[in-house]
Every structure is written in structure tokens, then in C-alpha cells.
Amino acid sequence: MSSRRRRCKRQLIKFTQHIARLITGTLNSDNEDEEQESTTVRYHPENLEQLQSQTHFSRQELQLLYRGFKNDCPSGVVNEDTFKNIYAVFFPLGDSSKYAQFLFNAFDKDKNGSLSFEELVCDLSVLLRGTTEEKLNWAFNLYDINKDGQITKEEMLDILKSVYDLMGKSIHPRLKEEAVRQHVRMFFQKMDINQDGVVTIDEFIDCCQKDENIMQSLKIFDNAV
């Protein structure tokens, strides 16, 4: 693995740990007393059971996650500006705003401009404990910017450009836009099996499962938390 990819992996893991700490309430209270935790608001049983069926977290884990989330986010939501600010802390050498926007949109399932506990914990469950297929479906949703069920070459280019902007000065030498476009053309051609100009979820999953580098990259969060 190149030093560039290792740096990106470390930063992404740190960011995931940060989101997990935000949800568990340890972001600003690492030494919080157990007794104090027990006095905070508890999750409503019906919603908890539904979330348990939708995630890879246990009932006890969800109760802890929710108590901490309410401690750090009393309003019960995280808006896009806050999300972008969090991301900027972990990628100070580049412009993370565009990638953070794409990521926020992938998390924001109901498209109301804010992330609820349910949305964050469901995506965190996929990233940390999801199956290969679940992670690939999540990645497809990230690339499918307009959420029409398919990925265009332009969408893939937008995501990849945002990744290079994210890494900023940590990339040496800085890639020219034409080099990025060429990379997208080659990768898109490989994924677009029937050459109809769009990549479907089946084509995306099939191609990714045959690519060893992609499959290894899906494991970067396995020991993040």
C-alpha cells in the first residue's frame, strides 16, 4: 500500500472513530461517570427494537449510543455545516467540503438537511460491522449522487475529484484534472459491463467483488472502534 493510501486510511479511521465518539457521548466527556450516564434519557423501547432489527448493534449498545448522542446533540440532529466542520478537522491539508457534502447526502436518507441518530447509527453499523454486500451497497449510494439508482461517469468524476481535493497537499505531485478524468474513464469502462453509459448496482457490486484492492479497502473500518 502506498504512503498516500496509508495516510488516507488513517485519516478515515480517525474520522469514523470521531463519529463513534460523538454518538457514544465520549467526544467531550471521556471520563464520564457511569452513574451520571444512567441518569440520562433512555431510548423509547419501540424505536429501539426497530433499530436493533435494522443494525448490527445489540439492544444494550443502542441504549448507550443513544444516551451519548443526546448528551452531545441535545437537538437530536447534526446539520451539514457541523458535519463539514468535523471532517475539516481530520483533513486540514485539503478542501474537504465537497466530499463531506457527498458523504452527508449519503447519510441523510430522508433528505431533510440534518442527520438524526437513526441515520448515523444505521450507517455506522454498515461501515463498522456490515457484510461485504452491505458495504458495497452503501458505497454505491455514495457514488449515486442524484439517487436515481445508477452511477454516471460525471458522478464518478465528481466523487473522485472531491477525494483528491480532500487529500490536498498530502498528494505529491498534485494530479492534473485530465489525469483524474482518464482514471475515471478507465474505471468506468471496466464497471459499465453492457456499455450503456451508466453503472447499475449489479454491475458495481460484480466489478468490486472481482477487484482485490477494492475488497481490501472495505476492511479499513473493521477495527476502527
Image (tube, grey):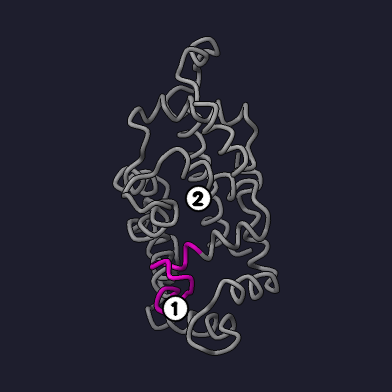
| Amino acid type, callout 1 | Thr
Q: Is disc 1 placed on a helix, strand or loop? A: strand
Q: Is residue 104 above or below residue 40?
A: below
Q: Quadrant of the N terminus?
A: bottom right
Relative depth, front residue between 175 and 76: 76
Q: Is residue 155 magenta?
A: yes
Local crowd at mark 1 within 10 Å, few (<14), some, or many (≥20)? some
Q: Is residue 136 above or below residue 118?
A: below
Residue at 42% x, 75% y: name it: 157
Residue at 61% x, 73% y: name it: 202
> On residue 115, which mark appears?
none
Relative to 147, is 65 on the left or the right? right
Residue at 55% x, 80% y: name it: 187
Q: Where's residue 102, x and y in %?
A: 39, 60
- Which mark lies nearer to you, 1 or 2? 1
Relative to 73, is 216 on the left or the right? right
Residue under numbered circle 2 = 11
Residue under numbered circle 1 = 152
Local crowd at mark 2 within 10 Å, few (<14), some, or many (≥20)? some
Q: Is disc 2 placed on a helix, strand or loop? A: helix
Task: Give the magenta part as a residue range.
Answer: 141-156
The furthest residue to the front: 46
Q: Where's residue 106, x and y in %?
A: 44, 56
Q: Does residue 169 show up? A: no
Q: Does residue 175 show up? A: yes
The furthest residue to the bottom: 195
User: For residue 29, what is the image quadrant?
Assistant: top left
